[in-house]
Amino acid sequence: MDNDKLIKEYGRFLTYKAKYYSKKGMDYDEVYQQGWLELMQTLRESELDPCLKTKEDIIRSIGSGLRTYYNKHNRGKVLNYGLTPEDCFK
């Protein structure tokens, strides 16, 4: 696929997702670049997998990849609500 065509088709979606995850504390540029990597990987997989032929399927795959990326990024973080783990088990 041509780069201009990819930007036209998926650029707005990737910008939206990068803004979404940047509001959750991640770096905008990092998420945006990861989104493009997910798109390239999905397009490569779509050549082999007939289930990834529609634009909606590709967008769903990108969203899933970015969600996984976000979860891995935040795996070690603990939300602090003013309680320590010891307070929760008293």
Image: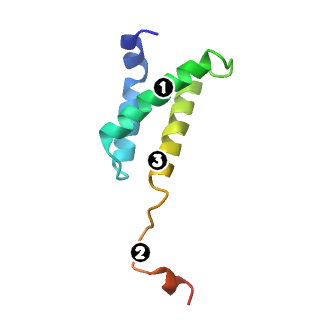
Q: How many residues crowd mark 3 within 10 Å: few (<14), some (14–19), many (20+)?
A: some
Of callouts 1 and 2, which one flags the residue occurring earlier in the amino acid sequence?
1
The three-letter code of the residue at mark 1 reads Leu
- What label does residue 39 carry, if any? 1
Mark 2 lies on a secondary structure that is: loop
Which residue occupies 42% across, 34% down? 34
The three-letter code of the residue at mark 3 reads Tyr
Marks 3 and 1, how far apart in space?
16 Å
Residue indicated by mark 3: 70
Mark 1 lies on a secondary structure that is: helix
The three-letter code of the residue at mark 2 reads Tyr
Instruction: Pick out the residue farthest to the right.
Output: 50
Marks 1 and 2, how far apart in space?
36 Å
Give the image location of residue 58, x and y in percent. 55, 25
Give the image location of residue 46, x and y in percent. 60, 19
Instruction: Pick out the residue farthest to the front.
Output: 76
- What label does residue 80 carry, if any? none
Give the image location of residue 29, x and y in percent. 31, 37
Q: Are marks 3 and 2 in contact (CB under 8 Å)?
A: no
Of callouts 3 and 2, which one flags the residue occurring earlier in the amino acid sequence?
3
Q: How many residues crowd mark 1 within 10 Å: few (<14), some (14–19), many (20+)?
A: many
Which residue occupies 45% across, 29% down? 37
Report the coloring of the rendering.
Answer: rainbow
Q: Closer to the camera, 16 or 70?
A: 70
In this orientation, does residue 86 appear?
A: yes
Residue indicated by mark 2: 81
Vertical placement of residue 2 versus 26, above or below:
above
Give the image location of residue 81, x and y in percent. 41, 74
In this orientation, does residue 55 appear?
A: no
Q: How many residues crowd mark 2 within 10 Å: few (<14), some (14–19), many (20+)?
A: few
Mark 3 lies on a secondary structure that is: helix
Q: Quadrant of the C terminus?
A: bottom right
